[in-house]
Amino acid sequence: MRVLIADKFEKQGIDGLTGLGCDVQANTEVSVAELGGALAAAGSEVLIVRSKKVLAGAIGAGKSLRLIIRAGAGYDNIDCNAAKGAGIAVCNCPGMNAVAVAELVMGLLVCCDRRVPDQAADLRAGQWNKGAYSKARGLRGMTLGVIGVGSIGREVMRRAKAFDMTCIAHSLNMNPLRAQDLGVGHGGSTRADLLKMLPECDAVSLHVAANSESEKMCDAAFFGAMKPGAYFINTSRGSVVDEGALRAAIADKGIRAGLDVFEDEPAEAKTGWTTPTVALPGVYGTHHCGASTDQAQLAVAEEVVRIVKVYRNTGKFENRVN
């Protein structure tokens, strides 16, 4: 079985695939435009990617391709409909990076509250400005609204409780009994419920999948319902936020934002790029790296190997999403 790895991938995962008897080719620098040619040339049956876009053209060029594995949870970088039309399964690795993302969420919350990046920037510039940073609210006693309570949302709530924060959970399948089981407040399951929950929250953290229903769910009405001065954290996908509405809320309501993802973030690992959102005061951004810890990537690699092994042995597609 020939496997093409088109993104950075843990050595333990490569060794595991080789141990299964796979013919593994790692081409981590292949561009999005070149991916189809690489698939055709390698005759790959399995493609493994992280953030690299897999478009319809590349899928069509992979005549031997039967399985695309997203080495992570989200899969909006893959044209799942084109893959389904070509009889190709798309599988992901849900939950493997939940702890890593939850850790970043807490870091971004602390950054919003204590303005840690601003303080570091001043010190690097040779400025001692203690007076500007001597006031912070503190996270203890704050109410955190968690939108989406899959594996990541649940890990976030566990850590928020350790900070003595109160959590309210909202999701499409939330009900009072589930909220009670989670030990959190009931934030409802409808859009109306969400807008009713937001004024209660000192901070909000997003953990929703990117799809047509969630696109720009955080719009002017969403930010209009948030408390002035509240903290907004997004480690899910940039497409769920109307950044123009977020910028207006930052300017008009003093919202602070911790963002790991952006509307038009580049697909390349390194390139020149900017967005007006990150230039605003009170915005603390990271490079879509929520899942990028050694622990998380090792867990993802092990799950990828498991998916390939099940497919090789049984023909079944574990965690299929299309």
Image (spheres, grey):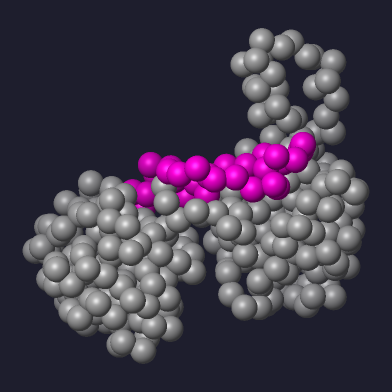
Q: Quadrant of residue 132 in the image?
A: top right
Q: Which residue corresponds to the image point at 28% horizontal and 65% vertical from the top-left?
A: 35
Classify the position of the N terminus by image quarter: bottom left
Residue 316 to residue 125: above or below: below
Is residue 76 visible to the viewer in this orientation of the structure?
A: yes
Residues rendered magenta in the picture: 270-299
Instruction: Confirm whether the magenta stretch covers residue 281.
Output: yes
Quick check: 152 left or right of 227?
left
Describe residue 242's horizontal placement relative to residue 236 as left or right: right
Quadrant hosting residue 258: top right
Q: Position of residue 183 (x, y in %)?
A: 72, 59
Residue nearest the observer in this picture, 184 or 226: 226
Residue at 23% from the left image edge and 76% from the top image edge: 62
Q: Position of residue 131 (x, y in %)?
A: 84, 15
Residue 57: horizontal and vertical position, in percent? 33, 76
Mark yes or no: residue 169 visible. Answer: no
Residue that appears at 65% across and 54% down: 234
Is 115 left or right of 22, judged from the image as shown? Answer: right
Reply yes or no: does residue 194 show up in magenta: no
